Image (cartoon, rainbow, N blue to C red):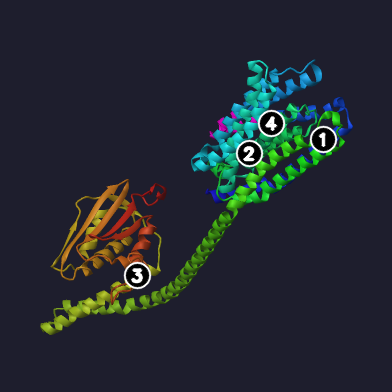
Amino acid sequence: MSAHNSFSEIDFIKTKSILTLLIITLVAITLIYQVRPFVTDDQFAWISLPAYLFSTLILTSFSFVLAIKLHKQKHYQSKAFLVFAIGSVFWFIAELIWIMYDHFWEGSPFPSEADIFYIGAYPLMIGFLLISLKPVLKSVSRNVWLFAIALGVAFMIPSVTGAYDDMLGEDTFSTTIALAYPILGSIQVIPAIVGILYLTKKGANFSWMLILFGFIIYGIADTFFLFAELDGAYYDGHPVDLLWLYTYILMIFSFHIRYKISKIPTSEQQAMFFSEKVQFETISKFGIPLTVSIIILIVGISLVHSVFIETDEKITAQNIMVGLVAMLAIFATIVLALNKNLSRLVKIRTEELVEQKEGLEKLVDEKTREILKSERLSAIGELSGRLAHDLRNPLSVMKMSLDLIKQSPEAKVSDSDVIKRLDLMEKSIDRIAHQVDEVLDFVRLSPLKLSLVSIRETIQNSVNKINIPENIQIHVSKADLKIFCDPVKLDAVFLNLLVNAIQALPDGGKIEIKIYLKNSLAFLDFIDSGMGVRAEHFDKVFEPLFTTKQKGTGLGLSSCKNIIEQHNGTISVSNNPSTFRIILPINVEEPEKFKL
């Protein structure tokens, strides 16, 4: 199935419905978090604890299920999802330890065991992104990589600077852990940005888009959290918590879609995940609405918290703006990249539509001509069949009478002029009879009467039936093959090809018939020393009613083609030397074995 056909399979996933449900889920969790300004820390823990634990647990379960399913399908992404599953286990353990320190154990040390697991998840997630991007990495230009790296470094420098300043005087291990967060987070954002840019230029499906958006939001959340922590402004229920939850929710929905895609045959899943046919559907219909929705939600919750949270929580306009500017910078990049390429994409799509339109018009014209030609041939065939049938009887009488006159001892025809005229009459009758036979052979396509015959013997019998001029030599290959065929019909084919070859040699020449076996197929080459078929006639030589002879019907080679194809074979023509090649299966009743 092509990439275009594979895209039609996405209909059963109901992408628009999933997008609607996703936005509803994000709005619902955001609204639930709006109770934070009006409840105590212990009361809000009944919301935050289940939210983080269940989201990471569901994500871990989904990723392991996908890894196992794709491994059974021997899909390249099975390794990627296994790596992600291990990384999500790290997330779950880190969240669990964080919750234990925050709500059950005394103290909140830094670095804690949770920090080790958070940092350990970064290399795994980077590995997941790179393995998933592997099929398209060669399509990503150097400029895209440089832009993504530059953007990642731009995020890293202020974060690393702020973290380093805050850790002055601390031990080396603690400082290393503090710096590892912004460094690894920035590195993780780089392949995600590359994927987003690939999405705007080429195309990927909704599932891949959600994964990339999730990692981008995770990187923004890390930056947002770092500055909140440096200012001492972080608290349980802070807007940054929603960003992490958005990441988990996006990825859960993404893996749900990916699980549905995994039900499609493995050979078609690649086209479902990356395809140049789906960029408009993915970006314009899904990416932009989702981006706008997330930005509105974050702006909304930040404003609510800035108004209702007490001042001793140290939420400042600067903290809010750092996070919002970071998020807007990333998504503004996406929108700008989309805008930059939108006119090009529209032009490409327009050209594709015009090409498809022209192709359809051409196909309709061809089919119309074929139908008209078929109807005309049908009418001609019916009329020709009746005429040919009616002509055979008087021709037979004339032929028989002429034979009797020539053979009767009582006639005593001795006048040379009379004998000459009788010979001319006989040749004329033979020519008319031959043309009548051509018409009848073309009109009636009777079933094959198969038998095991010798090809060489059948060809030799056909040669013996022809009046061969003295200046023409016919050589039949000594090789022989026995095949299942209709000898009567093949005899008609051989006679037609031999007569045509003789007519192509008015000044004499040689006709050679080769017989050989190749790939369990019988090859028959009728080669003559004539001028061959003109190049402009190659595509028409087997068409009904096409002829270059003044007295031909144009049905002989067409009848030959019909008979050969009825035997599940092929017939073709070539020059230098002039050759008509017939290829036949040894057993016509086993066409599945007939492979050129």
Circle 2 SS class = helix
Which amino acid type is marked by label 3? Leu
Which amino acid type is marked by label 2? Leu
| Residue in the picture at 51% in, 64% down | 358
Question: In this view of the protein, can residue 8 be seen by the observer?
Answer: no
Question: In this view of the protein, can residue 348 be seen by the observer?
Answer: yes
Residue bearing the label numbered 3: 555
Residue bearing the label numbered 2: 212
Q: Are marks 2 and 3 in contact (CB under 8 Å)?
A: no
> In the image, residue 6 lies at what x, y percent?
57, 48
- Segment tinted magenta in the rendering: 59-83
Q: Name above or below for residue 323 compared with residue 97.
A: below
> In the image, residue 435 lies at what x, y percent?
31, 73
First of labels 4, 2 by sequence position: 2
First of labels 2, 3 by sequence position: 2
First of labels 1, 4 by sequence position: 1
Which amino acid type is marked by label 1? Tyr
Q: Are marks 1 and 4 in contact (CB under 8 Å)?
A: no
**Label 2: how many residues lie within 10 Å, few (<14), some (14-19) or many (20+)?**
many
Q: Which mark is residue 222?
A: 4
- Cα distance between the residues tagged 4 and 2: 16 Å
